[in-house]
Image: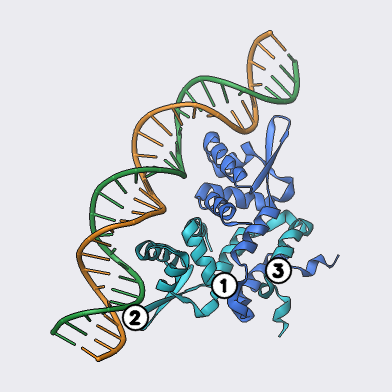
Chain colours: A blue, B cyan, C green, D orange
Amino acid sequence: MELKSAIASLSALAHEGRLATFRMLVQAGPEGIAAGEIARRLEAPPNTLSANLKVLTHAGLLTSRREGRSIIYSARFDQMSQLLGYLMEDCCAGSPEICAPLARVLARTACCVPEPLHA
Amino acid sequence: MELKSAIASLSALAHEGRLATFRMLVQAGPEGIAAGEIARRLEAPPNTLSANLKVLTHAGLLTSRREGRSIIYSARFDQMSQLLGYLMEDCCAGSPEICAPLARVLARTACCVPEPLHA
DNA sequence: CGTATATTTCCGCTAGTTTGGAAATATGGA
DNA sequence: TCCATATTTCCAAACTAGCGGAAATATACG
């Protein structure tokens, strides 16, 4: 990931409605949620939500597929990983103990630490 | 971390000069870098940089201390951890394999995974 | 006290973003 | 074909952020 791409992702997320949308989709996993259902849950007007989904998609954070009359959106975890990696690249100037709180927080998002991947 | 706080951090980072500044400080570690030195490295005018440092600090991402005539800025890793945790909270709907790329990327930021903490 | 260095504040201008109503487009089913 | 549902596009007004020159503040040192 490079600067411009990271800026695009961060700008897209730096917005109340869009951040709520993205987190909802992160929690929904790869199955995703239909645009209309997202609008209903967030109580957002359809046009506003549509604009927000467009911004997030354009930033590479979401992907979508049509399913009947609905369009299903889901989070792109690969892109998200790139972004987090970019932010913390070469962190701490070789002082791992500084990162301890970070490691602890990430460990709480249970599925995102190397250990469970032994399978 | 809650929504408003996350928005503040993301907005602060969603800016070319500020993101470059923040990453420089992440890589510098807790020792930090003086404002003037940052301006010199980024070739940014002092007033512009000062405004950017103010935004990042107000968002809770930086802290500063005076040292003689200089003001030394450094990244707040605790706040950063909170932000990353907030973004990935309850992710993947119980499908750890989706997070595999994420774990791989984070593992590359060597100091930020639980394993090296065994010490 | 006076001068040099380091950083921040002030100010107005420009450019880009957010918003929602209404209309347009796309799909499914009778 | 015609209608209902689902989503997106268009548009203009209000808002917000970014920018840099110049002046102000703070510290250091002789």
Q: Is residue B40 above or below residue A22?
A: below
Please, which chain is the residue tagged with disc 1 on?
A: B
Judge left or right: residue A48 versus residue A95: left
Residue found at the very far right of the displayed protein? A119
Badge 1 and badge 2 in a common chain = yes
Judge left or right: residue B58 versus residue A29: left
The 10 Å Cα crowd at callout 3, few under 14, some 14 to 19, many 20 or more, is some
Q: Is residue B78 visible?
A: no
Callout 2, which amino acid?
Answer: Arg
Q: Earlier in the sequence, mark 1 or mark 2?
A: 1
Residue occupied by mark 3: B108
Instruction: Tell whether label 3 touches label 1 (CB within 8 Å).
Output: no
Question: Gap between marks 1 and 3, in whole Å?
Answer: 14 Å
Please, which chain is the residue tagged with disc 3 on?
A: B
Callout 3, which amino acid?
Answer: Arg
Q: Position of residue B109 (x, y in %)?
A: 67, 70
C20 and A2: which one is in front? A2
Mark sitting on residue B27 = 1
